[in-house]
Image (tube, helix red, strand yellow):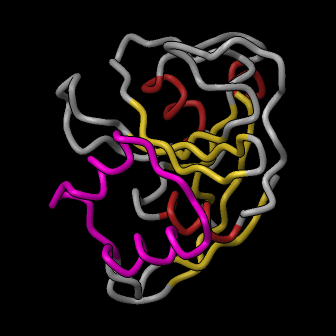
């Protein structure tokens, strides 16, 4: 799926207020990211073309680490998104389909039906959330933060969103 998103020109407090007004739920890791002073928003509005694709489509069906996924994406002119893009994506994609029902809660992997927004982490510390993913659970849109470590191997079924260069 490709889509063009409007980002920028919204302060972090306003972005958070917009998410809450739209009924978007955040988990504790997402709240941590919003509270971090290193998470900034762009002062001017811009359009970003976003491509979402499975890990399998980047790796010929295999899993891979985030660093490897970034290299493979760059070869296709796809790059990490600004961290704020995830919040704008959530607001502009409120009708995201539900994830697969009946699956046990996922741990140490992206939940079925989620879209992880590929973005540069704020730092390398394991305790710092690395970014956001979008998910819809029982009709409720979520913007969830996640933690990961550099050696984590993303599943071929995981879906990531990258910024596309023109």
- Please give left or right for residue 99 compared with residue 77 in the image: right
Q: Nearer the viewer, residue 23 or 79?
A: 23
Q: In the picture, residue 17 is in which quadrant? A: bottom left
Q: Nearer the viewer, residue 67 or 118?
A: 118
Question: Residue 86, percent across and down?
Answer: 52, 57
Q: Is residue 117 above or below residue 71?
A: below
Q: Is residue 96 above or below residue 107?
A: below
Question: Residue 69, percent across and down?
Answer: 54, 28
The residue lying at 77 percent from left, 50 percent from top is: 139
Q: Is residue 35 above or below residue 153?
A: below
Q: Is residue 111 above or below residue 52?
A: above
Question: Residue 155, percent across and down?
Answer: 65, 15
- Please give left or right for residue 88 compared with residue 138 in the image: left
The residue lying at 74 percent from left, 21 percent from top is: 157
Task: Give the overall secondary structure of the magenta segment.
Answer: helix
The residue lying at 15 percent from left, 61 percent from top is: 37
The residue lying at 55 percent from left, 43 percent from top is: 133
Reply yes or no: does residue 64 show up in magenta: no
Q: In the picture, residue 72 is in which quadrant? A: top right
Over which residues does the magenta segment extend?
A: 12-41
Q: Nearer the viewer, residue 147 or 100?
A: 100
Question: Residue 132, percent across and down?
Answer: 47, 45
Number of numbered markers: 0
- Please give left or right for residue 58 compared with residue 48 in the image: right
| Quadrant where the image shows the C terminus | bottom right
Reply yes or no: does residue 13 show up in magenta: yes
């Amino acid at each position: 799926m490709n889509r063009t998103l409007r980002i920028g020109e919204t302060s972090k407090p306003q972005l958070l207020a917009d998410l809450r007004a739209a009924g978007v739920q955040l988990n504790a890791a997402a709240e941590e990211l919003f509270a971090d002073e290193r998470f900034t928003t762009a002062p001017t509005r811009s359009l970003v073309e976003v491509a979402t694709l499975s890990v399998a489509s980047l790796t010929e069906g295999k899993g891979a680490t985030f660093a490897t996924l970034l290299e493979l994406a760059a070869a296709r002119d796809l790059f990490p998104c600004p961290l704020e893009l995830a919040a704008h994506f959530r607001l502009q994609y409120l009708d995201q389909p539900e994830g697969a029902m009946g699956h046990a809660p996922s741990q140490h992997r992206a939940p079925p039906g989620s879209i992880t927004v590929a973005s540069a982490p704020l730092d390398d510390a394991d305790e710092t959330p690395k970014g956001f993913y979008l998910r819809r659970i029982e009709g409720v849109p979520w913007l969830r933060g996640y933690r990961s470590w550099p050696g984590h191997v993303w599943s071929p079924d995981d879906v990531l969103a990258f910024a596309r260069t023109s």
